[in-house]
């Protein structure tokens, strides 16, 4: 059994290590995988995007724990979701947005049965006292329905999942900025698969600055030059060869991308 961890805890402090200790103390035979603990602090969209990207690469039955929780200690809910044969334990603050839109929802339960919590629950560390022990009990064979009632709704981020279609153009925005400063947009590969249009014929502009045709790799432009290409996530990306597109075109939430 695999349990993955995606958090904004960082690695400077003990928080991530404590999660592992709780899990292994209750389920010593599981394999714990660190996805990342470098989600930008409190950035729910960042966490949601990373969670979506890892989903296709893990086997059925994997349990994912995602902690990006600026509302810790409040009445916000913690959910146990099941999507396409895998499980996720996450706060109900939008972290499940991209999973929920891209994969079949098999169940979603509100985690509320305190039998599965740590004996003492801190108001500032629900990752340790609720989410990690729930993951371990799930790995040990507890059924999702045992943790609480079915969720009647989910909180979803108010972000456009796919680019808007305007005639022969796609108008997109930035979903995510990766560690290289590359802008990952909501223009999806399948949206560019228009009949009779070759991929290389699409023309890209960013904030009305023309970048020309889609490229297939970074070396097709000179060092320091901007380009657009389809990234490994299946999204159109705006990059700078050996540079940072976010510094060229940012702030990222004001970037508008048009493909025509």
Image (cartoon, rainbow, N blue to C red):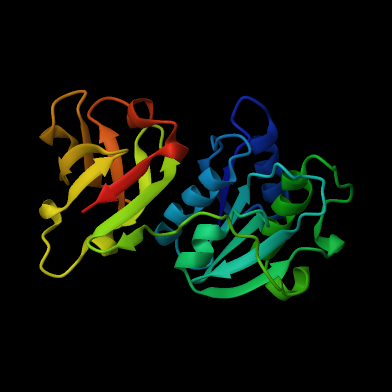
Count of residue discs: 0
Q: Nearer the viewer, residue 56 or 151?
A: 151
Q: Nearer the viewer, residue 189 or 142?
A: 189
Tell me what residue is drawn at x 10 percent, y 68 percent: 196
The answer to whether residue 105 is visible is yes
Quadrant of image for the N terminus: bottom right
In this rendering, the answer to whether 188 lies above or below 34 is below
Tell me what residue is drawn at x 26 percent, y 64 percent: 167
Q: Nearer the viewer, residue 154 or 59?
A: 154
Q: Is residue 186 left or right of residue 32?
A: left
Tell me what residue is drawn at x 69 percent, y 44 percent: 69
- The quarter of the displayed image where residue 9 is located: top right
Q: Is residue 4 left or right of residue 214?
A: right
Q: Is residue 19 left or right of residue 167?
A: right
**Residue 96 position within the rendered picture, expressed as x and y whole percent measured from the top left:** 57, 58
Quadrant of image for the C terminus: bottom left
Spot the residue most to the right: 120
The answer to whether residue 1 is visible is no
- The quarter of the displayed image where residue 237 is located: top left
């Amino acid at each position: 059994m695999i349990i993955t961890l995606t958090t904004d805890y960082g690695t400077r402090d003990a928080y991530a290590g404590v999660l592992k200790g709780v899990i292994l103390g209750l389920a010593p035979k599981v394999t714990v995988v660190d996805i990342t603990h470098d989600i930008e602090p409190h950035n729910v969209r960042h966490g949601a995007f990373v969670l979506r990207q890892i989903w296709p690469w893990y086997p059925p039955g994997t349990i994912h724990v995602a902690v990006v929780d600026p509302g810790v200690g409040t009445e916000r809910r913690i959910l146990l979701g099941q999507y396409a044969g895998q499980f996720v334990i996450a706060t109900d603050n939008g972290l499940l947005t991209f999973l929920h839109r891209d994969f079949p929802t098999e169940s979603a339960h509100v985690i509320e049965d305190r039998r599965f919590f740590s004996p003492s629950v801190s108001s500032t560390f629900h990752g340790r006292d609720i989410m990690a022990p729930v993951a371990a009990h799930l790995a040990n064979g507890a059924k999702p329905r045992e943790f609480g009632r079915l969720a009647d709704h989910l909180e979803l981020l108010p972000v456009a999942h796919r680019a808007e279609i305007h005639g022969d153009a796609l108008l997109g925005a930035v979903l995510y900025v990766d560690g290289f400063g590359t802008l990952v947009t909501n223009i999806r590969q399948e949206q560019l698969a228009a009949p009779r249009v070759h991929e290389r014929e699409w023309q890209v502009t960013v904030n009305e600055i023309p970048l020309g045709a889609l490229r297939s790799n970074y070396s097709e432009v000179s060092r320091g030059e901007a380009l657009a290409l389809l990234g490994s996530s299946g999204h159109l990306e705006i990059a700078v060869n050996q540079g940072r597109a976010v510094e060229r075109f940012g702030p990222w939430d004001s970037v508008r991308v048009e493909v025509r």
